[in-house]
Amino acid sequence: MNFQLTSDGRLRHLLTLDGLPRATLTQILDTAESFMDVGEREVKKVPLLRGKAIFNLFFEPSTRTRTTFEIAAKRLSADVVNLNIATSSQSKGEAILDTVDNLSAMHADMFIVRHSQSGAAHFIARHVAPHITVVNAGDGRHAHPTQGLLDMFTIRRYKGAFHNLTVAIVGDLLHSRVARSQIHALTTLGVPEVRVIGPKTLLPAGVEQMGVKVFHDMETGLRDCDVVIMLRLQNERMRGALLPSAQEYFKFFGLTPEKLARAKPDAIVMHPGPMNRGVEIDSEVADGPQSVILPQVTYGIAVRMAVMAMLAGGTAA
Amino acid sequence: MKIHIKNGRVVDPMNALDAQADVYVAAGRIVAVGHAPADFHPNRVIDADGLVVCPGLVDLSVRLREPGYEYKATLESEMLAAAAGGVTSLACPPDTDPPLDEPGLVEMLKFRAKNLPGPRVYPIGALTQKLDGKLLTEMAELTEAGCRAFTQADAPIADTQVLLRAMEYAATFGFALWLRPQDVSLARSGVAHDGAVASRLGLPGIPALAETVALATILQLARATGARVHLTRLSTREGIAMVRAAKAQGLAVSCDVASAHVHLSENDLMGFDAHFHLIPPLRSLRDRDAIREALRDGSIDALCSDHTPVDEDAKLVPFGESEPGASGVELLLPLTLKWAREMGVPLSQAIDLISWKPAQILGVPGGHLSVGGNADICIFDESAEWIVTPRALASQGGNTPFLDQPMQGRVRYTLIDGHLDFEAH
């Protein structure tokens, strides 16, 4: 798995948080911390990646993630090219590699890749020219490492440390690349108790082998939690017999002030966005004092700057 | 052509023979084992000193890719590969394009194969027209054309009533049905074993239940209809236990597994390498160990390569989009030997699983070295070490999960019908 690290332990690609050492994760978070003030400056730029060509290679539509990567790259003074390649227009297979080869020939330095297939970023990383680095911006259900990292950054900012926390991840873990990256990061950073809460239809087989405790009800699952992470429930999950209705889901697994009261009084509420208000989260909670959902977005830029800077071989500004 | 195979270790499970002996071949037949017949003047002497002489291998699943998939592999390339793997008889599944659902297609394939060097080719007919799981094929006509059994290969029969009718009809004539148990709904959109590894990698899963639920249906229907059923490519511990129990109750079923599944597991998927995308999916270590044990205790009747050459581009995509399957006919022998070494199983028992026993399932001559029988013989070096590379394989499909892996055991000569169809250089 660790072909994303060089032989001397430096980050070569960022494909998954699974198997990355704690020191690497901490280094990314520390680097992100040093970039936090760039966004506050009048000139929101550092020259770290000047002259570097970064390609946003999105085989699956995304506005938010692509935009934050673009902002992060531009703050590092890189040249950014956005390519939205709808999977439907791709004649499958070779076309992916053709695209990659073509862009490599344009002297790309970094690919930010999103794809609907798990393992797509690994696949591309295995086939790019040696000087190109790959950042996984979400592959199927597998991983979304920068989201996982920005969530860790958020938790560290609000809670200071990881070793004394109880963290609950609630909702559709089966289809969630975000949840998988969060679980790997949380367990690697030493969170002693990571819980997952959801109906059996939305929890992957053998999820407990990833080092989490499984709960099927919010009342016990949220008890004394320091961090509550809500996952997005996509509308399409209502088809295909996974769930009967959004209403019933909200009743049992939607985060309301009453359910949140089970957690510690100073618990924070997170969500990777975009939210389905009234499906997985009540607006009163989403906009309430314990919500850190908007800061997550802000931190996402610093974290992505850190990842790109480290991959490009630079250090903090 | 008279051939004298000298000083080899002759391993012939059917005749319970494992001894140093000479084998004499004339006019396509084995004319003596041990002492030379009177006036035997060989045209060729093969020095088999240090080599094993065994029945030519019988492989229950080799996709030759013709007609329709010549860009993946050709009859020529794959028959050569089979001979290089020591295989002298093979069953060819009907999932070609068009599928082998008409006598003319079967006759054409047999005719083409007969005129090429390489193993005897026994087509398995399509059980339903176009393999669509709806209308039965003309099984009697297809049998006359040369089909040895009928199967859907990996295509589903979603409608259980069709499966019941197929069994009833086949039972009327005594035709054998080869079925791979997999419930089509439970397996829907899955690409990997539904377990800890697929969960970690975010790959849509095929639960073990997909096999056992289908198996329960097949076994019940077989009991009710008396159809001759051979179960192909079992992959789960529970499925094997069900077949073992059914046999113990007296049901006449047989089963096989693919050689890759004897050695690999879901854990091998961790790097998303599409070469590990197989049908059925590589399952847990627990399942793999159950397969290894069931081969030893005889619950599994045969090992096959499930040879599926795939063109390179179909594997050069993300795992979930890749075409499943592995080229394997040249690895059947070394992978069987590897299992036997690791499990402490005698060589004779290992060879039985890839010669005599599959010959019985297929219902064809061969799989033994009896005097008077066809001279289908495999001569191999048990200790020869080699590395699996596309160049080391004759198959057009370089797609194997064992790429760059060391193998022990390599075929030196393959005789088919008394002809030296393969000779290693």
Image: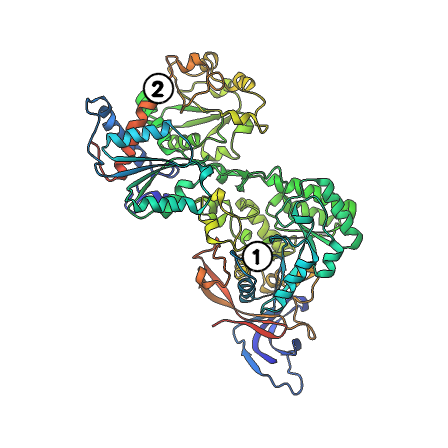
The answer to whether residue A149 is visible is no
| x then y, percent, for residue B68 | 57, 55
The numbered mark at residue B65 is 1
Q: Looking at this view, is B74 or B165 the one in front?
A: B74
The chain carrying label 2 is: A
Quarter-wise, where is residue A267 in the image?
A: top left
Give left or right: position of B224 versus A279.
Answer: right
Q: State the CA–CA distance, disc 1 to disc 2.
A: 56 Å
Name the residue located 53 percent from the left edge and 42 percent from the top edge. B191
| x then y, percent, for residue B423 | 52, 72
Amino acid type assigned to the residue bearing label 2 in the image: Leu
Q: Is residue B214 above or below residue B391?
A: above
- Secondary structure found at label 1: loop
Q: Are marks 1 and 2 on the same chain?
A: no
Amino acid type assigned to the residue bearing label 1 in the image: Arg
Mark 2 = which residue?
A: A294
Quarter of the picture containing the N terminus of chain B is bottom right
- Secondary structure found at label 2: helix
Q: Looking at this view, is A81 or A277 the one in front?
A: A81
